[in-house]
Amino acid sequence: MSFLRGQVDPSKGEHRYARVGYLKPPFPTQGEVFDVYVPRDELGELQQDLLAFLSGRDQGKVWALSGRQGVGKSNFLRMVKRQLEEMRAEGEVSATGVHLFHGNSWAPSYLIAGVSDAIGAETVAKLLGTATQPPAGFAQTDFGRFWSRARSQGNLTAASEFLMRWLGGAQTYAPERTTYGITARDRLAPAIAVPYLRALVEMLSVSDILKRIILLFDELENVQAMRPAQQVEYMQLLKTLLNAFNWQGMYVLLAGAPAVFNYVQSTLPSLAGRWKLVELQPLRSVEHALRFAEEYKRHAINPKRNPDLANVFPTEIDIKAAYIDLSQERSGGVRQRDMLSKLHELLEAHLTKSASTPPRTVPRS
């Protein structure tokens, strides 16, 4: 007997928001990130630069997005990733790979695995089907031997999947390494993988299969939670990766708390010298808070009810009051995360109150 099938009541759950005109919850809870992006002036230059890169400019760039927790760094990176994937699926951009590093993915091996993921095994399988050869100087390396062996094996999908695992630092086994002419043992060291990845991307670019890689790093401050030696190893590897690509075909967005960028500036000033820093700001005015909240309301509203956004709960009066309350509690502006959580709480309280209030009856005459 199923404990799921036939037990779900479709009248419950998110349908409660229909009472105030929404199709789904309009505001996230504390720490949750919705796929809603509200344009912000401080990111205008970055967005124009990224558009130029996607429009054909070969030279990439490194941007550092600095801001305290809750000001929208994760929201922006998720928006970039989502839009790139949609644009690639619809054919608006091509030959572009993207990977988002989440806040719990900080280890040297994860850095290389993320680049491998941005490239993708399917992309490598396409390259194996061409006659493109590794750059000069790689013939006597494990990377060079892989290409000559893989093409003779015939199974391009299996070969491409092995290459991505191997370059990403995953465990490999003696029989498969023998098949592809790999003499190195077990796992490939991240520092050795970097020049191989650079050579692979060069081959892909020559074949017009992949020309751009975009790497998005969220919550970079978690690097500081590593052991000191691992911190240094990770940042040195990031520097090595950027040096290997030398701006060609790679675009990087690093997002984190101000402290992590100060740390890099003091320990690896040459790496800090490679990025352009932009500071993300909190909400600093009632007008800004209104525009911000209405964008979240708009994405969840039921258009069939022809709503007046200003009067759908929370109304403009509710939003202004929430912003004023939060700004009095905290100096230096209101974090977007706090504003959304406050509006979520207000809406939940409103729904609970309206559900518990008995309907008015008309007295009989």
Image: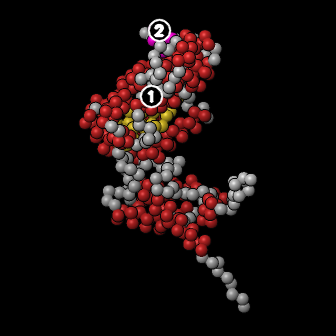
At a point 47% along the width and 67% down the height, the residue shown is 318
Tell me which residue sits at (58%, 55%) in the image: 300
Residue matched to label 1: 112
**Callout 1 amino acid:** Ile
Type of the residue with mark 2: Ala
Is 278 in the magenta? no
- Mark 1 lies on a secondary structure that is helix
Up-down: is 116 above or below 84?
A: above
Whether residue 315 appears in this view of the structure is no
- Can the viewer see residue 325? yes
Give the magenta range. 140-145
Residue most toward the left?
266
Q: Position of residue 27 (x, y in %)?
A: 52, 57
Give the Cα separation between the discs numbered 1 and 2: 22 Å
Report the magenta stretch's main SS. Answer: helix
Q: Nearer the viewer, residue 222 or 62?
A: 222
Report the front residue among 84 and 74.
74
Label 2: element kind: loop
Residue nearest the viewer, comparing 74 with 276: 74
Residue topped by disc 2: 139
